[in-house]
Every structure is written in structure tokens, then in C-alpha cells.
């Protein structure tokens, strides 16, 4: 049911199929005049710069070779790692809330739905950067406040934990969209692979932090709350992408 990306087809020297797909899209959108104007020459002319860049090969090193790409990659790695770190740290420590383990699991899973809907709206209204940063900082604040709530107030502790978990789920949603818009087309897959790897690292480290409870009972919660706050501050240094064209080349990012 899905048509292949016209851009991908052109880069694979299949311009005829790309034209056919674009004409089909124009027909679906009742843009018949625009569809008639589409031909191979027009497509290749509009993608001349991208076609010239596609002749070279790109590696993971290109993510850190230039200044803007380097700072952007470092910031995104921190954001992805801390989001995954705090998310799985909360999810794997449900028994401390004193609520039925199955009930809290249902609550923790259900909160993702409204969280993702809300962050989708905020990203479109306020922008990607404030949404990403705000979700992380709010999540960290909820986790840290939870450390100050007496253990016998289970309802309050559970509500704060659920709110924090929802914010982290929202952060994950923002991460995928934001990173995809920041990385240029020619190296987007490399960039997404890099930050996804950092998220997996965060997930692997998260359960190990719970071992620190043997030394200080509050230390795991402090780390789980501090990490998203710090990464929320780091996210403020990323460029805003709302309403901006998606970059095609590394030079587009540097400019």
C-alpha cells in the first residue's frame, strides 16, 4: 500500500519510478496541474546538490568531523542516554512504591498514551527544543521530589513516579522526531544508529545503579532524577527545527 520514497528512488538511479510515484501522490491530493509538471529533468534538477553528495561515502566519523555536527551529536547522545537510563530505572524498580505490582505495571504502561499525545501537541505548538528540554527537566524534578516524600504516603509517591515516567515516555517520542530532523539526509541513518546505541547503553546501566542502594538508600533516585535534569539543560543547546527545512547535507547543518 505504501509507495517508495521518491528521493530514495532518485538516489538509486530509478527516476522513472520516482516520477510515477509523485504523479500518483499529486493525483491523490487533487493537484493535477502540479502532477503534470513533474518529469525526470525537474526532479534531477531539484536534487542536483543531493545527487552530487550521494556519490561519496559517509561513516560514523562524519558525525563528529565538523564543529556543529560534533556538538549536536554529543548533545543528542546525552539526551538519548539519560532518557533511556531514567525510563528503565523507574520501570524496573516498581516494588518500592508499595502498590500491587500488577496494578502499578498497568498504570506505568497506560501513562505513556496521554504523555505521547501531549508531547505531540507541544512539539507542534512550542517547538521541539522546549518540548524535549521541558519533558526531561520535569521528569527529573518529579523523581527528586519523590525522594522527599515519606514512605508511608504511597499514593503521592506513586503519582509522582507515574508523572515522571510519563515525561520520560514523552521525551522518547520527541527524541525520535527531533534527532531525525537535526541530522542531514546523507548521514541520518548513521546518526540515528549512534544515538539509539547510546539509549541502549543507558538501559543497560540503569539496573546497575540500583546496587548503590546498599550504600545510600536515596542515591539511585538522586541519580535517576539528576540525569534527566542535566540532559534537559544540554538539550537547550540544540537548534530548533520547527518550521525549518530538513538539511540534506552536512554543509547545510554547518551553515
Image (cartoon, rainbow, N blue to C red):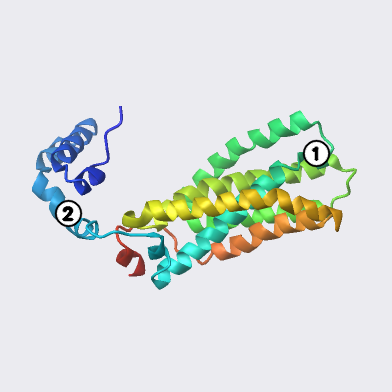
Residue 46, labelled with which disc?
2
Of 3 and 153, nearer the camera is 3
Helix, strand or loop status at disc 1: helix
Q: Name the residue: 68% across, 37% down.
A: 108
According to the picture, the residue beneath numbered tag 1 turns out to be 95
Helix, strand or loop status at disc 2: helix
The C terminus lies in quadrant: bottom left
Are the two marked residues, 1 and 2, in contact with CB atoms closer than 8 angstroms? Answer: no
**With respect to residue 241, does 163 lie above or below?**
above
Category of crowding for the residue at label 1, using alpha-carbon neighbours closer than 10 angstroms: few (below 14), some (14–19), many (at least 20): few
The location of residue 114, given as percent across then percent down, is: 59, 37
Q: Name the residue: 75% across, 29% down.
A: 102
Q: Which numbered mark, 1 or 2, is in the foreground of this view?
A: 1
The location of residue 163, given as percent across then percent down, is: 69, 45
The location of residue 12, given as percent across then percent down, is: 21, 46
The answer to whether residue 243 of the structure is visible from this angle is: no
Among the 4 quarters of the image, the one containing residue 100: top right
Category of crowding for the residue at label 2, using alpha-carbon neighbours closer than 10 angstroms: few (below 14), some (14–19), many (at least 20): few
Q: Name the residue: 45% across, 49% down.
A: 177
Q: Earlier in the sequence, mark 1 or mark 2?
A: 2
Q: Name the residue: 40% across, 54% down.
A: 190
The answer to whether residue 3 of the structure is visible from this angle is: yes
Amino acid at each position: 500500500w505504501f509507495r517508495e520514497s521518491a528521493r530514495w528512488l532518485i538516489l538509486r538511479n530509478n527516476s522513472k519510478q520516482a516520477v510515477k510515484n509523485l504523479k500518483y501522490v499529486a493525483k491523490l491530493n487533487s493537484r493535477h496541474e502540479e502532477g503534470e509538471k513533474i518529469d525526470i529533468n525537474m526532479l534531477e534538477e531539484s536534487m542536483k546538490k543531493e545527487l552530487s553528495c550521494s556519490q561519496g561515502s559517509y561513516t560514523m566519523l562524519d558525525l563528529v568531523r565538523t564543529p556543529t555536527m560534533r556538538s549536536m551529536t554529543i548533545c543528542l547522545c546525552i539526551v538519548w542516554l539519560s532518557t533511556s537510563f531514567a525510563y528503565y530505572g523507574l520501570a524496573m524498580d516498581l516494588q518500592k512504591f508499595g502498590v500491587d505490582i500488577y496494578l502499578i505495571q498497568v498504570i506505568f504502561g497506560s501513562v505513556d498514551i496521554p504523555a505521547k499525545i501531549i508531547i505531540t501537541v507541544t512539539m507542534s505548538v512550542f517547538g521541539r527544543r522546549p518540548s524535549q528540554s521541558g519533558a526531561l527537566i520535569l521528569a527529573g524534578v518529579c523523581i527528586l521530589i519523590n525522594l522527599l516524600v515519606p514512605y508511608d504516603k504511597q499514593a503521592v509517591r506513586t503519582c509522582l513516579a507515574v508523572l515522571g515516567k510519563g515525561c520520560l515516555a514523552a521525551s522518547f517520542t520527541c527524541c525520535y522526531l527531533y534527532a531525525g530532523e537535526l541530522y542531514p539526509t546523507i548521514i541520518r541513518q548513521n546518526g540515528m544508529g549512534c544515538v539509539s546505541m547510546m539509549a541502549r547503553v543507558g538501559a543497560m546501566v540503569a539496573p546497575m545503579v540500583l546496587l548503590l542502594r546498599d550504600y545510600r538508600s536515596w542515591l539511585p533516585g538522586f541519580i535517576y532524577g539528576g540525569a534527566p535534569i542535566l540532559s534537559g539543560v544540554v538539550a537547550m543547546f540544540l537548534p530548533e527545527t520547527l518550521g525549518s527545512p530538513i538539511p540534506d547535507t552536512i554543509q547545510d547543518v554547518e551553515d
